Amino acid sequence: MNTEYKAWRVEEQDGDYVGSEKTLNIGDLPEGEVLIRVSHSSLNYKDALSASGNKGVTRNFPHTPGIDAAGEVVESSSAEIAEGSQVIVTGYDLGMNTSGGFGEYIRVPAGWCVPMPSGWDARTAMIYGTAGLTAGLCVQKLLTMGAQPEQGAVAVSGASGAVGSVAVELLARLGFEVVAISGKADHEKSLKALGAKEVVGRDALTQEKKPLLKPVFANAVDTVGGTPLAELLKQVKPGGSVSCCGLVAGPQLETTVLPFILRGVNLLGVDSVEIPLQDKKTIWQKFSSDWACSKTEASARDIGRAELDAALKAFLKGESAGKIVLDHSK
Ligand SMILES: NC(=O)c1ccc[n+]([C@@H]2O[C@H](COP(=O)([O-])OP(=O)(O)OC[C@H]3O[C@@H](n4cnc5c(N)ncnc54)[C@H](OP(=O)(O)O)[C@@H]3O)[C@@H](O)[C@H]2O)c1
C-alpha cells in the first residue's frame, strides 16, 4: 500500500533532536502482520526520552516516537486479528526502534495487538496507555502479595505523574487509604479529588542517615526510583511491599538490606513492556470494567500533533501532570 500519512517525526539536526510534522509513506513502515490506522496515542516519559535523542530508548533517527497506539486494523494477515477491528498496542518495541503511535499508521506483529475490550474505544484506552497499564500492574502485584486496606496506608510517589495519578485513583477505588507523595504543592486538591487521603511533599523522602525509619506505610507504589525509593523502603511496615516501576529520580538504588531482613519488606519490580500479551489483556479488561478510573477518564487532556513538542518537554522537566492523549484528528 503506497499511501501518504502524517507523523510527528524526530530528526537529528547538528546534535539537537527536533520534532515536526512530516508526510510519510505507508509503504516505508516496517514489516508486520497488522497495519493499524492510529486514531489515538498516549504521552509517556519514555516518549520524551525518545524525542530528546536518548539512545537507550531510540538508536536511529529520523524516528516516529509513541510507545502507545490504538485504532482500527486496516490490513491483517493474522487469523487472530480481524480487519476492521479496534486494537490496543503498547510497549514491546513500539515507538522505540519501531515507528510508533505519533504517526497516523503503524505496522506491527500480531502478537503485539490486544483486541479492544467491549464497551471501550481508542481514546479511552489511550487515556490509560502504558502509564495506566503500569499503574495497574503495580497495584496487581501488591494485591498478589496480599495487600489489604486494613493493613494501613499505601504511599504513591510521583503521585501527580501519569503512572502515579492512575495508581492513586485505582488504590483509592479499591478501598486503600492513599498517601500521595508529590513535589507539586499546587496539586494537593487534584490528588485529593482522585482519592488521596493525604498529600505530602517530596521532603518525606529526602535522604536520612538512618538505615530504618518509623514504619508508616503498609505498602507503596514507587514511580521515581533513586533516593526517594531508598527512603520509602525504610518506612514500610513489616511484611509490606513496594512496587517499583520508574527512574525519574535516578536509576541508582542505594539501600541497606535492613528493610528486607529485619522487616521482611518486599521490593517488587514491574515491567509493562516485554510481559506476555495475556498479562496486558488482563489489566485492560480490569480497567474496562471494575477498575475503571472515572476521574482520570474525565480529567484527561487531548492534544494534537502540533502540541507534542511542548507536552514532551514538560515530562523531562518533571512538570507534566495527569494523563495526556494524542488525538490524530485534532
Ligand atoms: N516499568 C515500566 O514498564 C514503566 C512503564 C511506564 C513508566 N515507567 C517509568 O515510570 C516513571 C514515571 O513515568 P510517568 O509516565 O508517570 O512520568 P511523569 O508523568 O513524568 O511522572 C513522574 C512524576 O515523578 C515526579 N518527579 C519528577 N521528577 C522527580 C525527581 N527528580 N524526584 C522525585 N520525583 C520526581 C513528578 O511527580 P510529583 O511532582 O507529583 O512528585 C512527576 O510528575 C518513569 O521513570 C517511566 O520511565 C516505567
Image (cartoon, rainbow, N blue to C red):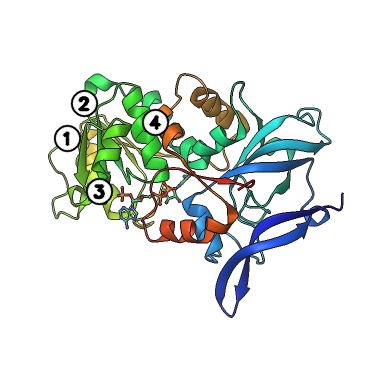
Label 3 sits on residue: 186
Q: Using residue 78 as the reference point, say whether residue 211 is left or right of it.
A: left
Q: How far is disc 2 from disc 4 in space, using C-alphas?
A: 23 Å
How many numbered discs, if any? Answer: 4
* Disc on res. 152: 2
Residue placed furthest toward the front? 330
Decide which of tag 2 and tag 4 comes sooner along the chain. Answer: 2
Q: Quadrant of residue 39?
A: top right
Q: Is residue 153 left or right of residue 224?
A: left
Q: Amino acid at mark 3?
A: Asp
Name which residue type carries label 4.
Answer: Lys
Circle 4 sits on which residue?
295
- Which residue matches tag 1? 216
Could you tell me which secondary element the residue under label 3 belongs to? helix
Label 4 packing within 10 angstroms: few (<14), some (14-19), many (20+): some
Residue 315 visible from this viewpoint: yes
Residue 130, percent from left and from top: 52, 41
Secondary structure of the residue carrying tag 4 is: helix
Q: Amino acid at mark 2?
A: Gly
Q: Position of residue 298 (x, y in %)?
A: 43, 33
Q: Is residue 244 visible?
A: no
